[in-house]
Image: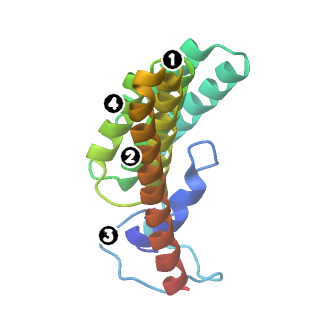
Amino acid sequence: MTSKQFSTVGLLVLGIAIGITGLPACSSEREPSAPSQTRVADPSDVIDEELMIALAQAKNFHRKAKVYMSDGNLVAATTSVRQILSLRFPTGAPEAEDVRADARALLAKLLVSQGQIEEAMRTVQEGLAQSQRESFFVANLHTVQGEIHEARAAQLDTEGEASKAKAADERRAAITAYDRSIEINVKLQKQLMEQR
């Protein structure tokens, strides 16, 4: 499996909270091949140990955040998600970008729920600025960006008539962000269909 296939297919399954020990490596040196259900595992398919450790740590911080969220402890959940962003990954690992984008999306949602809308937007913008390729996780960042624009619009709606035009601008920005997310996902779906 090539790095492109892994990035678009395998990482859709990753989502940090899903088991990660059986995923293939992202070696860009291998030749592309058609996916096979019966192919015998190759030793080069194994994820290196440093990457496995980083992914396992990310998974555990993510799970901790979910437990804190279920208890209503959003501050502790936010701290746990921020720890994902401080993890060290092997240089050039595309999984690092995906894990960080996923963490930033969750962090932004947590910040919005705590009324920290502008910090949430900065978090998403940082994630988008650091993206090297289109992926499900980048599309999700655009979706969260749209949600933040909606939160801004709702906040502006409470400020009276003078803020109505700004609220309308935020709603249009939300639609633009959602459209970008849709565009990325459609492109990824098309790539997946072409690989079948």
* Label 3 close to label 1 by CB (< 8 Å): no
Image location of residue 21, percent across then percent down: 58, 52
Q: Is tag 2's residue or tag 3's residue first in the polypeptide sequence?
A: 3
Compared with 61, 15 (above or below) is: below
Q: Amino acid at mark 3?
A: Ser
Q: Is tag 3's residue or tag 1's residue first in the polypeptide sequence?
A: 3
Q: Which residue is mark 4?
A: 122
Q: Amino acid at mark 2?
A: Ala
Q: Is tag 3's residue or tag 4's residue first in the polypeptide sequence?
A: 3
Q: Measuring 46% from the left and 58% from the top, which residue is drawn there? A: 179
Compute the Cα span from label 3 to label 1. Answer: 42 Å
Image location of residue 124, percent across then percent down: 38, 37
Q: Is tag 4's residue or tag 1's residue first in the polypeptide sequence?
A: 1
Q: Which residue is mark 2?
A: 96
Image coloring type: rainbow
Q: Which residue is mark 3?
A: 28
Q: Is tag 4's residue or tag 2's residue first in the polypeptide sequence?
A: 2
Compared with 22, 60 (above or below) is: above
Image location of residue 129, percent across then percent down: 27, 45
Compared with 88, 139 (above or below) is: below
Considering every residue shown, the one lying at the far right of the view is: 71
Q: Amino acid at mark 4?
A: Arg
Tell me if mark 3 has few (under 14), some (14-19) or many (20+) residues whose alpha carbon lies within 10 angstroms of its own: few
Q: Which residue is mark 1?
A: 115
Compute the Cα span from label 2 to label 3. Answer: 15 Å
